[in-house]
Image (spheres, rainbow, N blue to C red):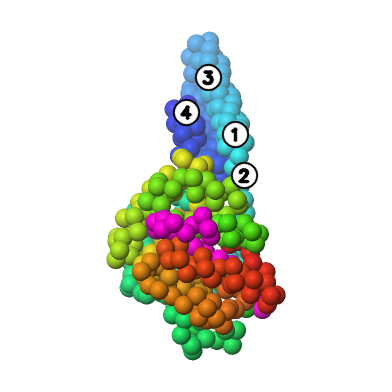
């Protein structure tokens, strides 16, 4: 009996069973021990009655047997109480409290949407903190969700917009991925709220970032900068300035492969993201919460993976193709089209590799303000 309780207490101290199971185990153990004690006393009574025929020797055996049974019962009760106290103390030390399970009240039922629930490991960090996921969760994502490579990016051509002036592709992507419970960010607000935001992709430095930061500072605007490992390592002073001036920094993948990070395995995508995340935390004490794919391609699997890891997967509702430094743009024409495609919740996505971005930025920000838009940070 004592061995059973000792093993139970060892499991409690090692955290291998939770508090609810521990309490049930203790109660069952106590009941078993009491039953055993009662049975022992009954059996002892039989022995004692037969021993009475032997006179005084039988009487002594009766007394000794009764004492032994009572002692075992007392010890069992004390051990059970001690184990229960230790279980309670362990729960207080770990900060864990038993909570009543509540039914899922979300609009979309995972089973109806064909999305199985993924078991969360006990050591998983709180939501919002980036972390690795288990091999089992990775396999569920691979088997459940679509891995087709899809393009994402908009030209500045007319057409393909909804009644709110939003690109239809952006609306469709936002709806589809939200139905699958992916944490995506396509629009900065609902279509009835006059809000806009700015995002910049920084794969490498072409000499325009400082000017862009100057403009943002003068206008009192904070933006989100999606960086790569190359950019972070080669431009520590710029990274520091971004942080000092209140801008948000997100992940544009660590390696930014030319074919697109979405073409790599899910394991490689996760490790790529974690490598940049770790570097930013070690060098700047900064945890990135947003992730933006590269080369204009993504998969549904990738969106789910990044969501499970704790990221918000950012698409932006208007991607401007200013990534080629060798293209000569007409600044006035570009600005006119960007103004024409402005909409409530618009997230403009720029690159910092062509001079035209810095040229049109002051006029675009002024236009937003003149039209009554609030320019917010995606943070």
Task: Specify which label sits upstream in the sequence, 3 or 4.
Answer: 4
Tell me which segment is drawn in magenta. 192-212
Q: Quick one: SS at disc 3? A: helix
Labels 2, 3: front one: 2
Q: Residue at point 49% right, 62% down? A: 200
Magenta-drawn stretch contains 193: yes
Which of the labelled discs sits on residue 93, or is there none?
Answer: 1
Q: Which residue is mark 3?
A: 68
The secondary structure type at the circle numbered 1 is helix
> Mark 2 and mark 1 in contact (Cβ < 8 Å)?
no
Q: Can you identify the residue that label 2 sits on?
A: 97
Q: Which element is circle 4 on?
A: helix
When the figure is inspected, residue 227 is found, relative to residue 3, above or below; the finding is below
Q: Nearer the viewer, residue 84 or 182?
A: 182
Q: Which mark is nearer the camera, 4 or 1?
A: 1
The answer, for residue 367, to whether it is visible in the render is yes
Q: Secondary structure at mark 2?
A: loop
| Residue 348 % position (x, y) | 53, 70
Q: In whole angstroms, how far apart are the C-alphas of marks 1 and 3?
A: 37 Å
How many other residues sit within 10 Å of disc 4, few (<14), some (14-19) or many (≥20)? few
């Amino acid at each position: 009996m004592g061995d059973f309780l000792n093993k139970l207490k060892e499991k409690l101290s090692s955290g291998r069973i939770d508090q609810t199971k521990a309490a049930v185990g203790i109660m069952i153990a106590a009941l078993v021990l009491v039953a055993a004690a009662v049975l022992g006393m009954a059996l002892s009574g039989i022995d004692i009655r037969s021993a009475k025929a032997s006179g005084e020797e039988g009487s002594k055996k009766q007394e000794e047997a009764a004492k032994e049974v009572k002692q075992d019962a007392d010890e069992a009760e004390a051990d059970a109480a001690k184990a229960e106290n230790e279980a309670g103390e362990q729960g207080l030390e770990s900060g864990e409290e038993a909570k009543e399970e509540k039914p899922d009240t979300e609009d979309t039922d995972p089973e109806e949407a064909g999305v199985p629930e993924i078991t969360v490991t006990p050591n998983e960090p709180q939501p919002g903190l980036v972390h690795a996921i288990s091999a089992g969760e990775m396999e569920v994502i691979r088997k459940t969700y679509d891995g087709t490579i899809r393009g994402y990016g908009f030209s500045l051509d007319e057409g393909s917009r909804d009644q709110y002036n939003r690109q239809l592709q952006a609306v469709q992507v936002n709806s589809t991925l939200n139905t699958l419970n992916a944490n995506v960010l396509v629009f900065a607000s609902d279509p009835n709220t006059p809000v806009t935001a700015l995002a910049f992709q920084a794969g490498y430095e072409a000499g325009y970032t400082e000017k862009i930061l100057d403009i943002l500072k003068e206008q009192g605007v904070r933006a989100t900068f999606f960086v790569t490992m190359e950019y972070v390592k080669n431009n520590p002073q710029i990274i520091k300035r971004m942080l000092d001036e209140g801008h948000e920094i997100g992940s544009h993948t660590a390696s930014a492969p030319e074919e697109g990070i979405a073409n790599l395995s899910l394991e490689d995508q996760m490790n790529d993201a974690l490598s940049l995340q770790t570097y930013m935390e070690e060098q700047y004490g900064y945890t990135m919460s947003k992730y933006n794919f590269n080369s204009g391609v993504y998969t549904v699997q990738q969106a789910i993976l990044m969501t499970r890891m704790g990221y918000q997967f950012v698409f932006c509702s208007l991607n401007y193709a200013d990534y080629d430094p060798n293209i000569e743009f007409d600044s006035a024409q570009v600005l006119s089209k960007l103004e024409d495609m402005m909409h409530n919740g618009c997230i403009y996505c720029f690159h910092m590799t062509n001079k035209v971005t810095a040229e049109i930025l002051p006029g675009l920000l002024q236009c937003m303000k003149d039209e009554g838009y609030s320019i917010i940070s995606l943070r």
